[in-house]
Amino acid sequence: MPYPVPASRVPFLKIDFSKIIFSKNIFSNRPRGSRPGVVTRHTPFIRPVLQCPHAGTRSAAERKMKKFCPFCESEFQTTTSAKFCSESCRLYRKAEGLNPIQRHEILKRVLAKERIPGTDLLWKPDFYIELIADQKCLYCLGELSPYGFALDRVDNAKPHSCWNAIIPACGRCNSTRSNIYSFEQFLLLKPGLERIRREERKK
């Protein structure tokens, strides 16, 4: 059995004597006549536990938290208190609104993150602009949010594609539906959502 490296030669490690592991049967095979607890040449070698002082701390990858960017409506991971996934999203947030080209740039970042093939129609600005041409939410008939790409998916379990992300939706309806309701279930709430929008316009 090789001898352990002395702690003096490994400066970043320290010996925690309070956590030295002893075997339950350490003195079970002691020679006849020897007293228990007395270390002799027949006593098995006890290797102390070398513990790194940073062993209890979590790594940066483990401290990452999943967040939801309020601007581009995409998930991102961070170890800080950042609210936006990138600096461009934070700057765009300060602006009054986005034009369709800027909206499509945000959508392209989401498509690239989800590894959508370049042949998908959502990569084409003309196809995307045609989807949001009315600037009306399909659910509540209200105006689309001034930020984000303003598209909802038919099936939220699937990525954004020209067959799935084809529903123009405002941010409120998109976040309300979330992963709770399916597309067919949320359409049942459409009359109530339209009534709420009409009452808001009267105020």
Image (cartoon, grey):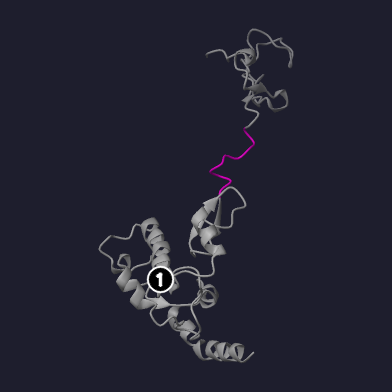
Q: Is residue 59 magenta?
A: yes
Which is more toward the observer, 116 or 87? Answer: 87
Query: At 56% from the left edge and 48% from the top edge, which residue is drawn?
Result: 64
Residue range (magenta): 55-64
In-image side of 193 versus 121 (left or right)? right
Residue 86 visible, this angle: no
Residue 121 visible, this angle: yes
Q: Is residue 83 above or below residue 50?
A: below
- Quadrant for the C terminus, please: bottom right
Q: Is residue 10 magenta?
A: no
Query: At 45% from the left edge and 73% from the top edge, which residue is drawn?
Result: 150
In-image side of 58 versus 139 (left or right)? right
Q: Which residue is mark 1?
A: 100
Q: Tag 1: residue type?
A: Pro
Q: Position of residue 196 (x, y in %)?
A: 58, 88
Q: Position of residue 94 (x, y in %)?
A: 57, 63
Q: Position of residue 119 (x, y in %)?
A: 25, 63
Q: Position of residue 10 (x, y in %)?
A: 60, 17
